[in-house]
Image (cartoon, coloured by chain):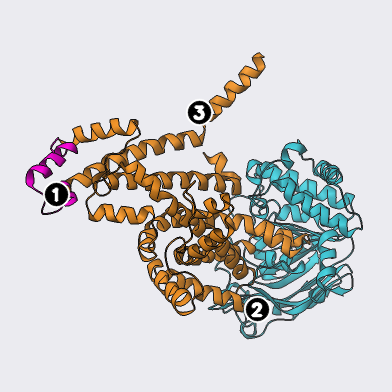
């Protein structure tokens, strides 16, 4: 087991209220396994990925839970151990590359710092020539043309696709074992989206990485992953082998989510799901999907359903299967 | 050779098209406009400058003669026309108070103010950045709370009140620093630049240098406190905002040490709003200097300007206002340079 998350609770605190976002999330990633997370915007997918690397904003509080990576609890690591993992074991592709690259520093400044600390951790103090060569190498990996110009550019001088390739190159530099990809295509043109996902797919296979892919593009999740988790309002609703999840979804939320995805083959537009995400300041006490669920029962309102193992590769949290 | 010529031509073209040339031309036009405006305002205000200059007991024919000398009987546009001709000859007209050319007066009084402002700016920059960084590095810590309280107090109390408080406490009660003036009695420094600190160094007079610095501390501090308070708050707020941005979290995700992240990747973008506010504060500094110079008996341009206003010294008013306008212009160009260094996006937007 490479990564195992158990009973994870994360809140965002502000002066006036607390947003209770992650509500006992659990998740497992085997070595070399490709895992997808689907769910609508605001479900806590980004929060979950940031929590794994402990890079939440300052108001984000991990109040309970365990994140075991390679047998060690990430939440209890010393700073230097954590730095080692951040530098050469786990890499993260942030959602919006424009927001995740510092606007007032050249790509070179940012990339060189990342490479420098990574190589130092590996026991080698790199010269600037080595940093340059390493940059060319990883830019070549992500098929980034004109690397010299890119290095000398500020983020705003690059196109969206190029920025995302820079982002991926940075993430890969640190992703020795696990890559976290947070909606890597959301902010890109449709034509580029496909290229980028194929690129990530190729790199993950080539380097034999584990990946957690968060995406709205269900088709891509279907093609690229072995296992899928459905996250809704900070709760894992369902876990299944990818094909099972898309062909025989069990949780009402998963069923509605997959049904409301637009398809080229279908006539008209999907129905969508009525209602909206709960208010995280005061979320439902029971199942967080209960207020929107067409099959809601009395017990759904008050008590959170526990995990039900349907088969070896299928788990659901829903009273319908109790 | 032809290539070289082409290159220098290109460079000239670039400069002519450049933002800075445009800015300089705009400010020349602005200063010209300001001169017309202030020239007219100074003259349409009620009160007879010639009479004020010579006193109530001067005989009428002498006063009339003086009016003629100043061309006060001519229409305003003729007066302005003659004034412009004078300006191109390096004369800014006669002061009615000192009976010298206004330019001579300004050159005499300006250095004292420049010295005060420069020293204030140094204190301001050091104070604002160190308090802002201390506060933004650990939000809600003891230091942060102290800085925030200081910021409220600093902004709420105007600089002339600070001047009086500091003078009372540091000079009168504790007797640590001199209460007013630029140099202690008995010390003298031959004038070269007019900045006493610089002049004393040029003369190798270390005693006078230290004495001059001691005289600068209270006035500069009282001018700087309000600015420090405001800028430290802005810097703190930007730091706290930036530290939660994805581009900072991304650096954390790569295991970059938090001190590198804070002092390199968070501080630079946070300095942009702070430096912008500093420009505005430099403007208020010039305004506040009027009162502070009065309190500390500081022989600067602001005190000269106030006297000019009260005595309706026409040409002196115009001269002082133009100098202030020029100072604004230079300050804004400097700030533009600094901001475009800090924020590369600015260059491309122009």
Residue B63 lies within the magenta run: yes
For the magenta stretch, what is the residue range? Answer: B50-74
Residue B18 vertical placement versus A182 (above, below):
above
Q: Which residue is mark 2?
A: A287
Residue at left offset 85%, top offset 52% = A204
Disc 2 sits on a residue from what chain? Answer: A
Mark 1 or mark 3: name the one nearer the start of the chain: 3
Q: Which residue is mark 1?
A: B51
Real-space Cα separation, disc 1 to disc 2, in angstroms: 90 Å
Q: Position of residue B99 (x, y in %)?
A: 26, 45
Chain B image colour: orange
Chain A image colour: cyan
Secondary structure category for the residue under label 2: loop
Q: Position of residue A285 (x, y in %)?
A: 62, 83
Q: Which residue is mark 3?
A: B16
Residue A27 lies within the magenta run: no
Does residue A55 appear to the left or right of A179 in the view shown? left
Count residues near mark 2 (Cα–Cα under 10 Å), then give few for <14, some for 14-19, many for 20+.
many
């Amino acid at each position: 087991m490479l990564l195992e998350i158990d009973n994870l609770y994360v809140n965002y605190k502000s002066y006036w209220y607390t947003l209770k976002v992650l509500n006992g999330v659990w998740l497992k990633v085997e070595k070399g396994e490709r895992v997808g997370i689907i769910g609508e915007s605001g479900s806590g997918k980004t929060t979950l990925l940031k929590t794994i690397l402990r890079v939440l904003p300052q108001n984000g509080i991990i109040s309970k839970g365990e994140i075991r990576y390679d047998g060690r609890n990430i939440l209890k690591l010393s700073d230097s151990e954590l730095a080692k993992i951040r530098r050469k074991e786990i890499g993260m592709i942030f959602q919006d590359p424009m927001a995740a690259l510092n606007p007032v520093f050249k790509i070179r400044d940012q990339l060189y710092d990342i490479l420098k600390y990574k190589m130092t951790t590996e026991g080698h103090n790199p010269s600037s020539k080595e940093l340059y060569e390493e940059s060319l190498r990883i830019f070549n990996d992500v098929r980034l043309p004109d690397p010299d110009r890119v290095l000398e550019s500020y983020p705003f001088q690059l196109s969206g696709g190029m920025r995302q390739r820079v982002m991926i190159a940075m993430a890969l530099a640190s992703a020795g074992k696990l890559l976290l990809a947070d909606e890597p295509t959301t902010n890109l043109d449709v034509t580029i989206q496909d290229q980028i996902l194929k690129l990530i797919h190729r790199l993950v296979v080539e380097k034999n990485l584990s990946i957690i892919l968060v995406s709205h593009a269900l088709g891509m999740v279907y093609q690229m992953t072995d296992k899928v988790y459905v996250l809704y309002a900070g709760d894992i609703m369902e876990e299944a082998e990818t094909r099972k999840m898309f062909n025989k979804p069990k949780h009402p939320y998963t069923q509605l989510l997959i049904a409301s995805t637009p398809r080229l083959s279908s006539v008209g537009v999907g129905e969508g799901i009525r209602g909206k995400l709960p208010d995280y300041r005061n979320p439902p006490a029971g199942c967080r999907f209960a207020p929107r669920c067409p099959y809601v029962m009395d017990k759904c309102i008050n008590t959170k359903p526990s995990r039900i193992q349907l088969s070896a590769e299928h788990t659901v949290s829903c009273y319908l299967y109790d | 050779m032809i290539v070289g010529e082409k290159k220098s031509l290109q460079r000239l073209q670039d400069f002519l098209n450049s933002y800075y040339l445009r800015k300089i031309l705009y400010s020349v036009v602005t200063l010209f406009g300001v001169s017309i405006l202030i020239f007219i305002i100074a003259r349409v205000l009620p009160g007879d400058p010639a009479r004020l200059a010579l006193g109530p007991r001067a005989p009428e024919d002498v006063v009339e003669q003086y009016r003629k000398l100043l061309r006060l009987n001519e229409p305003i546009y003729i007066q302005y026309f003659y004034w412009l001709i004078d300006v191109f000859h390096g004369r800014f007209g006669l002061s009615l108070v000192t009976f010298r050319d206004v330019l001579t007066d300004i050159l005499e009084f300006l250095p004292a103010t420049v010295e005060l402002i420069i020293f204030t700016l140094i204190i301001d920059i050091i104070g604002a950045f160190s308090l802002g960084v201390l506060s933004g590095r650990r939000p809600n810590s003891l230091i942060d709370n102290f800085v925030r309280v200081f910021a409220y107090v600093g902004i709420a109390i105007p600089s002339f009140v600070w001047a009086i408080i500091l003078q009372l406490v540091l000079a009168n009660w504790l007797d640590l620093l001199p209460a007013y003036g630029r140099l202690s009695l008995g010390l003298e420094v031959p004038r070269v630049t007019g900045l006493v600190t610089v002049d004393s160094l040029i003369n190798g007079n270390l005693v006078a240098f230290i004495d001059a610095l001691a005289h600068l501390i209270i006035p500069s501090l009282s001018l700087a406190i309000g600015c420090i308070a405001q800028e430290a708050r802005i810097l703190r707020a930007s730091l706290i905002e930036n530290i939660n941005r994805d581009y900072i979290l991304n650096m954390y995700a790569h295991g970059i040490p938090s001190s590198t992240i804070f002092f390199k990747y968070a501080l630079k973008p946070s300095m942009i709003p702070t430096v912008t506010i500093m420009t505005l504060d430099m403007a208020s500094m010039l305004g506040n200097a009027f009162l502070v110079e009065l309190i500390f008996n500081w022989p600067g341009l602001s005190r000269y300007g106030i006297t000019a206003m009260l005595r309706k010294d026409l040409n002196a008013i115009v001269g002082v206002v133009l100098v202030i306008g020029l100072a604004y212009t230079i300050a804004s160009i400097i700030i533009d340079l600094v901001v475009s260094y800090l924020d590369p996006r600015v260059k491309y937007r122009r």
